[in-house]
């Protein structure tokens, strides 16, 4: 329950403390009653008057100089608490230190949090007054965190500046009612990863572009033993138990087929589930539940292709640094426009913070060109590569990147990236985890023989209850 004494803090312009403003004193009038000068003494009086005037101005100048010097060195001390995920202190601290040099009155404490129960902790602690000023959140969490998110002030960055600076998916996810509710420092989403050596052995010269290419390639790439068991898979699709990001991928199938997460009983959803399941059904299956976890299988060269967010390439390279792999945009339906699913993290400011303006100033600093490139450089020192830049004007630096180029290409396209509230591995214990659970149940039910339609009808009831709880309406009702 929220403590009634803790209220969201309004955004206020920075004020000069009253004690620093000198009182305005009215000069005291003196009557003109000085005696007449004695003869031959006018020069002495003139010197006294001039000397007194000089002394008066020297004193006033000294007082003013003292005031301004005192004011410039005694700005209000600001302490900001910053909760992050994934990034170690040695990545973020150099940026914090640089900001401190330019803003000596601001002290920022960065804490790398544990993902489990993180979202719930941010919300609860913010509402009871002990939460962070700045925190990281997933792009799909906006409905779950709307009560604690502070809007980005136009005085720091206008909505038009935000739209020009960042990718279309950032504006789509974070701008609500002409206000932005987060500062993106990266972008990511689903891509296709394939094993170049397995493709070469199968006589396939290039990576797939469409789903037709996928279907042609998997028949050449899949290898089975004499008993019909899969030894090498063409692509890891069709199940939930051993396909990492199965729910994200089903969201991709659903979106590409014109479906809606809030309308799973419609034919478009059934068609999407059928398309997903066919890779693990019948004698032509290229994947089954006997295979290892999809990411592990890819690193062991037991599957030729997987669909995953680009950061999984880090996992794969850490397990098999010598793996010959390539990353490309996800396949498209022939004749349709490219479409993929976004999944990235954003920095937000708590509306319960007493220092919202200063927190947003720091986040704007982190989003600057020099800061983003420095973050990427620091990330690349502790792992194989950093996260893709959020700024459109830095896109050309990564568009040909071995692992991130596909992300940038998809982010640059208007409407290519979409967000769906069914992303696995966000650990939100809420919107994503709940809907992903219903998707998993639907996939597993079809493995047991339940029809696609019946499995999705059951899932729809649960999914719509979750959407109602988080006040998310079906697309058709928006």
Image (tube, rainbow, N blue to C red):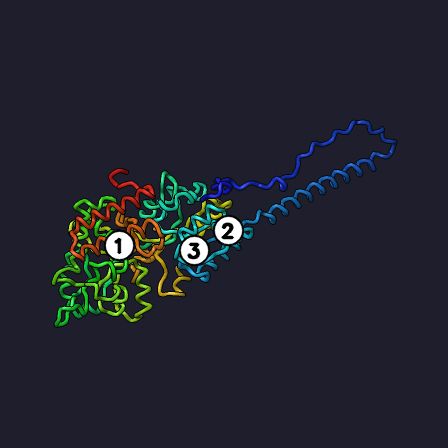
Above or below 431: residue 301? below
Q: Residue 95 or 193: which is nearer the viewer?
A: 193
Apparent side of residue 346 relative to residue 58 in the rendered image (left or right): left
Q: Quadrant of residue 231?
A: bottom left
Q: Which residue is mark 3?
A: 84
Residue at the farthest top position: 32
- Could you say where residue 77 lies in the image, as x and y percent from the top left? 57, 49
Position of the N terminus by quadrant: top left
Q: Secondary structure at mark 2?
A: strand
Q: Secondary structure at mark 3?
A: strand
- Could you say where residue 199 lies in the image, as x and y percent from the top left? 19, 67
Let me know if residue 217 appears in the view: no
* Mark 3 surroundings: few (<14), some (14-19) or many (≥20) residues within 10 A: many
* Mark 2 surroundings: few (<14), some (14-19) or many (≥20) residues within 10 A: many
Q: Residue 319 or 367: which is nearer the viewer?
A: 319
Picture residue at 32% right of the left edge, 58% below the top: 398
Q: Which residue is mark 1?
A: 247
- Could you say where residue 435 lies in the image, as x and y percent from the top left? 29, 50
Whichever of callouts 1 and 3 sits on the residue coming sooner in the sequence is 3
- Could you say where residue 157 lies in the image, as x and y percent from the top left? 42, 44
Give the CA separation, mark 3 to mark 2.
Answer: 13 Å
Q: Quadrant of residue 246?
A: bottom left
How many badges with numbers are in the image?
3
Q: Quadrant of residue 468?
A: top left
Give the CA separation, mark 2 to mark 1.
Answer: 36 Å
Whichever of callouts 2 and 1 sits on the residue coming sooner in the sequence is 2
Q: Which residue is mark 2?
A: 80
| Mark whose residue sits in front, 1 or 3 | 1
């Amino acid at each position: 329950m929220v403590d009634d004494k803790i209220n969201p803090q309004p955004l206020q312009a920075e004020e000069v403390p009253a004690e620093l403003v000198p009182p305005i004193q009215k000069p005291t009038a003196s009557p003109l009653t000085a005696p007449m000068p004695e003869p031959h003494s006018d020069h002495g009086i003139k010197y006294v008057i001039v000397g007194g005037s000089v002394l008066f101005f020297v004193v006033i100048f000294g007082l003013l100089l003292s005031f301004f010097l005192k004011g410039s060195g005694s700005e209000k001390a600001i302490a900001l608490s910053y909760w992050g995920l994934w990034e170690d202190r040695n990545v973020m601290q150099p940026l914090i230190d640089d900001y401190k040099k330019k803003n000596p009155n601001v002290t920022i404490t960065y804490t790398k949090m544990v993902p489990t129960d993180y979202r719930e902790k941010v919300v609860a602690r913010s509402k009871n007054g002990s939460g962070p000023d700045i925190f990281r959140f997933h792009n799909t969490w906006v409905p779950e965190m709307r009560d604690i998110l502070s809007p980005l002030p136009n005085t720091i960055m206008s909505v038009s500046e935000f739209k020009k600076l960042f990718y279309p998916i950032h504006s789509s996810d974070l701008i609500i009612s002409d206000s932005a509710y987060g500062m993106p420092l990266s972008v990511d989403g689903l891509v296709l990863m394939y094993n170049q050596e397995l493709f070469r052995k199968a006589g396939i010269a290039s990576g797939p572009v469409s789903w037709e290419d996928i279907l042609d390639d998997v028949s050449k790439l899949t290898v089975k033993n004499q008993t019909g068991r899969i030894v090498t898979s063409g692509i890891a699709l069709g199940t939930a138990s051993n396909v990492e990001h199965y729910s994200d991928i089903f969201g991709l199938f659903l979106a590409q087929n014109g479906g809606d997460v809030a309308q799973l009983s419609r034919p478009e959803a059934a068609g999407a589930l059928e398309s997903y399941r066919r890779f693990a059904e019948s004698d032509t299956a290229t994947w089954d539940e006997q295979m290892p976890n999809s990411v592990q299988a890819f690193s062991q060269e037991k599957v030729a292709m997987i669909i995953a967010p680009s950061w999984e390439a880090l996992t794969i390279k850490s397990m098999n640094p010598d793996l010959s792999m390539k990353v490309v945009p996800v396949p498209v339906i022939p004749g349709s426009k490219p479409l993929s699913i976004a999944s990235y993290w954003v920095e937000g400011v708590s509306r319960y913070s007493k220092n919202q303006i200063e927190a947003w100033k720091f986040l704007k600093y982190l989003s600057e060109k020099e800061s983003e490139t420095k973050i990427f450089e620091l990330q690349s020192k502790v792992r194989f590569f950093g996260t893709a830049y959020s700024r459109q004007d830095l896109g050309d630096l990564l568009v040909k990147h071995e692992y991130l180029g596909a992300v940038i290409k998809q982010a640059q396209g208007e409407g290519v990236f979409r967000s769906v509230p069914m992303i696995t591995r966000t650990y939100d214990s809420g919107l994503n985890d709940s809907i992903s659970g219903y998707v998993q149940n639907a996939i597993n039910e079809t493995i047991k023989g339940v029809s696609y339609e019946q499995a999705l009808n059951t899932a729809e009831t649960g999914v719509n209850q979750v959407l109602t709880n988080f006040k998310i309406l079906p697309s058709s009702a928006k």
